[in-house]
Image (cartoon, rainbow, N blue to C red):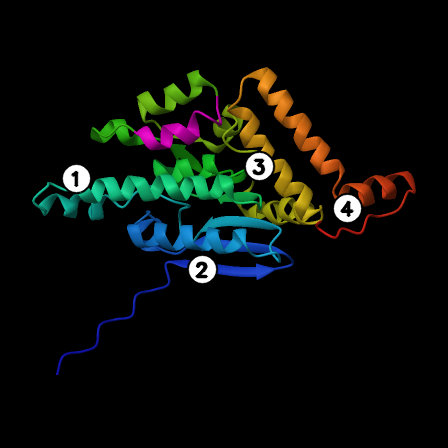
């Protein structure tokens, strides 16, 4: 009698505590490379979080020795055996990856990348797509596609929206690893801490954000990305309207009142 198929390991872990959802990529043996299944699970989880009022911030981490090594190249290579030499699978992969990265940006909850080990190619794209990033001192970053004949065109979208053009082109054209300290200089990560202090630094950042009005934070996050894509005058018109709507919210009334009365605000998230 044949043995039953081994149950696949959970590719994505979720742990919730104190209003913070921690998502952990769980393919440590593959350096958390983004297989189709992992990307599907991650996109689905962000969709759930977007509608979960109990979540006030998200931490994205990786299990094992690395944060994320990018796309699963073995999975992509296997698709070349199909009649279309993998075209349909490659299109599906890149479309799903783009959907995932936009889901992170569009998520109403701030997303913090907890980075250790390597964050390369689509893994670097993940870091750039998150709202904030804290890196261990030994973390390294790269968009190394050029080294294997595959320019990191989709990672380029997120990267070029985080760092200066010259820094983005340096990473994209050389494919070389940069240190965590250099990534901080580029603006790819917010801060760098010793590995032993990584969890504490991430937790502190998440706790500070979770203490704010979730409504105000979600309004601000959406407005931040919306105004970036607009010309200056349109950005100010848009941001002014957002401020007016925000002022009419109950939490703005409460927060301003608490400030004037020198007391702690009581958020209602409305």
Is residue 155 one of those drawn in magenta?
A: yes
Question: At 43% across and 20% down in the image, what residue appears?
Answer: 167
Residue on which disc 1 sits:
87
Q: Residue at x 54, y 38 (%)?
A: 131
Label 4 or label 3, whichever comes before in sequence order: 3
How far separated are the C-alphas under marks 4 and 2? 35 Å
The residue tagged 3 is 222
Q: Residue 126: where, in percent of width, then height?
A: 43, 40
- The quarter of the image holding the N terminus is bottom left
Does residue 1 lie above or below 154 as drawn?
A: below
| Front position in the image: 143 or 236 | 236
The residue labelled by disc 4 is 250
Disc 4 to disc 1, C-alpha distance: 51 Å
Counting the numbered discs, the total is 4
* Quadrant in the picture for residue 152: top left
Query: Closer to us: mark 3 or mark 2?
Result: 3
Q: CA distance from mark 3 to mark 2?
A: 26 Å
**Residue visible at 82% across and 48% down?**
265
Would residue 241 be found to the left or right of residue 120 on screen? Answer: right
In front here: 202 or 40?
40
User: Please, is residue 184 above or below residue 49 in the view?
Assistant: above
State which region is magenta.
Answer: 152-163
Q: Earlier in the sequence, mark 4 or mark 2?
A: 2
Mark 2 surroundings: few (<14), some (14-19) or many (≥20) residues within 10 A = some
Q: Badge 2 is on which residue?
A: 13
The secondary structure type at the circle numbered 1 is: helix
Place of residue 174 in the rendered image (x, y in percent of width and height, measured from the top left): 32, 22
Q: Are marks 1 and 2 in contact (CB under 8 Å)?
A: no
For mark 4, give the secondary structure.
helix
């Amino acid at each position: 009698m044949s043995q039953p198929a081994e149950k696949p390991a959970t590719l994505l872990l979720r742990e919730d505590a104190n209003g913070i959802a921690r998502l952990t990529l769980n393919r440590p043996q593959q350096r958390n490379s983004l297989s189709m299944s992992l990307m599907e699970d991650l996109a689905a989880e962000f969709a759930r979080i977007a509608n979960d009022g109990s979540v006030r911030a998200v931490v994205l981490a990786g299990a094992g020795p690395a944060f994320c090594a990018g796309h699963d190249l073995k999975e992509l290579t296997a698709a070349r055996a199909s009649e279309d030499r993998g075209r349909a699978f490659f299109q599906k992969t890149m479309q799903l990856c783009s959907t995932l990265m936009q889901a992170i940006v569009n998520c109403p909850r701030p997303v913090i990348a907890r980075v250790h080990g390597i964050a390369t190619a689509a893994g670097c794209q993940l870091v750039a797509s998150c709202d904030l990033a804290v890196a261990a001192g030994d973390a390294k970053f790269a968009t190394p596609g050029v080294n294997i004949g595959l320019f990191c065109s989709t990672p380029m979208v997120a990267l070029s929206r985080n760092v200066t053009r010259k820094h983005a082109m340096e990473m994209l054209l050389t494919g070389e690893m940069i240190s965590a300290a250099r990534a901080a200089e580029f603006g790819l990560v917010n801060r760098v801490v010793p590995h032993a202090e990584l969890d504490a630094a991430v937790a502190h950042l998440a706790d500070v954000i979770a203490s704010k009005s979730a409504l105000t934070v979600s309004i601000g996050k959406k407005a931040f990305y919306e105004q970036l894509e607009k010309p200056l005058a349109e950005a100010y018109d848009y941001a002014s309207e957002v401020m007016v709507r925000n002022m009419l919210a109950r939490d703005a009334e409460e927060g301003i009142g608490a400030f004037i009365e020198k007391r702690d605000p009581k958020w209602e998230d409305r």
